[in-house]
Image (cartoon, rainbow, N blue to C red):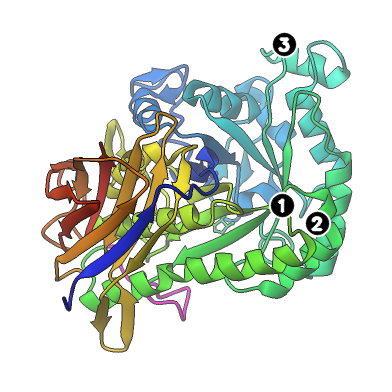
Amino acid sequence: APGSATATLRADQPGPRMHRDVFGQFAEHLGHGIYDGIWVGPRSRIPNDAGYRRDVLDALKAINVPMVRWPGGCFADEYHWRDGIGPASKRPVKVNTNWGGINEDNSFGTHEFMGFVERLGAKAYVSANVGSAPPSETAQWVEYITAPANTSVLAKERGKNGHAGPWKLQYLGIGNELWGCGGNMRAEYAADLTNRYAQFAKSANGPMLKIASGPSDENYEWTRDLMRIAGKNIDGLALHYYTRPRDKDWNDKGPAIGFSEREWATTMAHTLRMEEFITKHSKIMDETDPAKKVMLAVDEWGTWYDPTPGTNPGFLMQQNSLRDAVVAGLNLNIFAHHADRVRMAAIAQMVNVLQAMLLTDGPRMVKTPTYHVFDLYKPWQDATTLPIEVTSPWYHLDEVAVPAVSASAVKDAAGRVHVALVNLDPNRAVPLSVAIQGVQASTASGRIITAATMDAHNSFDQPNAVAPAPFNGAQVANGALTVTLPAKSVVVLDLQ
Ligand code: AHR
């Protein structure tokens, strides 16, 4: 019927694993991302575990954060790791020239970061300074982190600073946005530097995947050059893509809340371009890497709006609404469709910055709609992807037209099938019928995230305005799953 969607789920044709690191998060020294957001210091009145906010740790643990990328971003290519070790009182105070021009006291450094990921049970992804430091600095940082106890001068120094044994460093970023804030380089020069820095960075404690600074958006030439010149020496190429409602001028991106339906529509159309970017970059990578040894690591993605009025514009603070939840669901579905190549990603950013999971204000904290989507998608972590093809009605507004329904499906280790369905149409519910092949199921139940308004959000006074609710509107009968997806919603179902 017009206005309805159909789909086919092929549980009998399992695809690649969706690597749990796709649910990684980015934490930069930017605004209140680290300080106040994660780290308040051990003497704070805000309840903390050795300086880490307890509320933030608990919330992040509950969504199984698999990996954290740190310390930048643009900050990475100005960061000197030695500034962040040793007694906190002796660490140099510097100016964070990228973000707000404020003082950086370096009280959160390597030990604090490693303690953070350890508490989360997450992997560490450290971005090294390629733009303004020599390769020896990267090599020594990796040695400081990974050398066995007492084996070298740096290992001994680490011991003196309170950590005798080595840490694991699962990912090393070779610079960040080398085409921009990382040094305004040409691709060929960046590729040469990538080879050089990668050569001397050696983990002494297990595998360490090297991620090259990759393209932004549709910079396909960058991908071609990096793969041609450095493809053999790297494990991943980073892709950065931010969703802006207005994408012509970085000084006018559109507000985070109180936006028009037109801005809802353009946000959806722009975010769906992720599919095109991944497909095209991946195809170029196939030319030199048909076995897909090099991953496409989407290690900066998410929405970027005008900053919250009255806040330091360099802090990139923005509210997070139901629109962000829908954006998160769409992107996670896209990553699931490309699980063979996209084996790691990091949403920008974890706390208080851009499309954050959590917002804090002094001792208070709220979980954003985006947080709740990551919670709903937990079964996707390390599950086997299943093909699901959707034929969807279109959502139109003026010249913007996008398919209303997006889906992904996985089978977990216990053999249970999970289906994620997003209806981005803000006005109309969409009836959907899914032919399910290769799975014996008689019920489908799960949770939904939706709200009455497009910009519904969680404030410190109303922290649960947007939260998952049980969803019982799906039926399974005669090999078909039928459900009516409410307007502007993310629904995750377990088939049993
Ligand atoms: O996430 C904010 C900034 O966006 C990062 O520092 C930079 O890498 C990107 O341009």
Q: CA distance from mark 2 to mark 1?
A: 7 Å
**Is the magenta region chiefly helix, strand or loop?**
loop
Locate residue 229, reporting x and y percent: 86, 62
Q: CA distance from mark 2 to mark 3?
A: 35 Å
Camera-near label (3 vs 1) is 1
Q: Residues within 10 Å of mark 1 (few under 14, many from 20)?
A: many
Image: 380 above or below 86: below
Q: Quadrant of the N terminus?
A: bottom left
Labels 2 and 1: the sequence-earlier one: 2
* Kind of residue sitting beneath label 2: Gly
Instruction: Kindly indicate whether the residue at mark 1 contacts the one at mark 2 (C-beta within 8 angstroms).
Output: yes
Image: 287 above or below 113: below
Q: Residues within 10 Å of mark 2 (few under 14, many from 20)?
A: many
Q: Which residue is mark 1?
A: 294
Secondary structure category for the residue under label 1: loop
* Kind of residue sitting beneath label 3: Ala
Left-right relation of 140 to 357: right
User: Can residue 184 be spotted in the picture?
Assistant: no
Camera-near label (2 vs 3) is 2
Q: Which residue is mark 3?
A: 164
* Kind of residue sitting beneath label 1: Val
Q: CA distance from mark 3 to mark 1?
A: 33 Å
Locate residue 202, reporting x and y percent: 83, 33
Q: Which residue is mark 2?
A: 231
